[in-house]
Image (cartoon, rainbow, N blue to C red):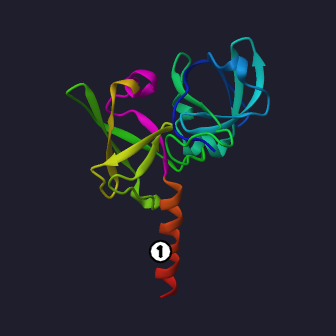
């Protein structure tokens, strides 16, 4: 479980395909604090550390993960948002994030407004995910508050600190991002759908 508060920007050093799997080697300042089998969020995707060497570590993504996320679009030299799993007793500074990406979205616009930025994203509504105004959303692993919630699009406001310390500063129109919708909202929607069917 994660909070959506990014700890570091990791650099993609190597991408290696092995059958349908993708091994990602990441360089990070927190590598020396990691251990084999540890869960780490990469752009909001929970992946397991399988190898450590110096300031680099390797994680592996399987086909299902590659199909549902933007990992296949990564290139050597790209940056990924990194967060380690929360410790029991830690403050929950963001919101409850599982590290299980629901779907991707496309950045439709980036607007700078008085020192902050507004990013608007559009996603496939046929997957039945929803946002609500002032609700929580995770974009590339970053815990954010929804503004301008619509059927298949929403915006988020990014403060200068978040812009500088996450890969939001690389987003342009057309950038594909990972979305994890609020887990509480997903359960409520599921219950609503079940009740609607049984009525």
On the image, the x and y values in percent for residue 151 come to: 32, 58
Q: Which of the two residues, 141 or 69, is positioned nearer the viewer here? A: 141
> What span is in magenta?
162-181
Left or right relative to 40: residue 71: left
Q: Give the residue drawn at x 52%, y 69%.
A: 190
Count of picture labels: 1
Residue bearing mark 1: 192
Q: Give the residue drawn at x 62%, y 17%.
A: 28
Q: Residues within 10 Å of mark 1 (few under 14, many from 20)?
A: few
Q: Which of the two residues, 155 or 143, is positioned nearer the viewer here? A: 143
Please tell me whether residue 1 is drawn above or below residue 73 in the rendered image.
below
On the image, the x and y values in percent for residue 106 come to: 38, 40
Left or right relative to 117: residue 114: left
Q: Which of the two residues, 120 or 160, is positioned nearer the viewer here? A: 160
Corner quadrant of residue 34: top right
Residue 169 lies within the magenta run: yes
On the image, the x and y values in percent for residue 149 come to: 31, 53
Q: Which of the two residues, 33 or 105, is positioned nearer the viewer here? A: 33
Q: Secondary structure at mark 1?
A: helix
Q: Give the residue drawn at x 60%, y 43%.
A: 99
Residue 197 lies within the magenta run: no
Viewport quadrant of the N terminus:
top right
């Amino acid at each position: 479980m994660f909070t959506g508060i990014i700890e570091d920007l990791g650099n993609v050093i190597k991408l290696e395909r092995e059958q349908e799997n993708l091994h990602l080697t990441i360089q990070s300042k927190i590598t020396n604090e990691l251990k084999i089998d540890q869960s780490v969020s990469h752009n909001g995707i929970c992946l397991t550390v399988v190898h450590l060497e110096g300031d680099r570590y390797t994680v592996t993504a399987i086909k299902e993960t590659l199909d549902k996320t933007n990992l296949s679009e990564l290139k050597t030299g790209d940056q990924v948002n990194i967060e380690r799993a929360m410790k029991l007793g830690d403050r929950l500074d963001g919101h409850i994030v599982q590290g299980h990406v629901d779907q991707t979205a496309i950045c439709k616009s980036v607007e700078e407004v008085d020192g902050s930025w507004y990013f608007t994203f559009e996603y496939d509504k046929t997957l039945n995910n929803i946002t609500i105004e002032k609700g929580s959303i995770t974009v590339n692993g970053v815990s954010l508050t929804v503004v301008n919630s619509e059927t298949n699009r929403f915006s988020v406001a990014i403060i200068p600190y978040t812009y500088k310390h996450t890969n939001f500063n690389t987003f342009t129109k057309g950038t594909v991002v990972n979305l994890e919708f609020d887990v509480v909202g997903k359960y409520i929607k599921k219950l609503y759908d079940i009740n609607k069917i049984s009525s």
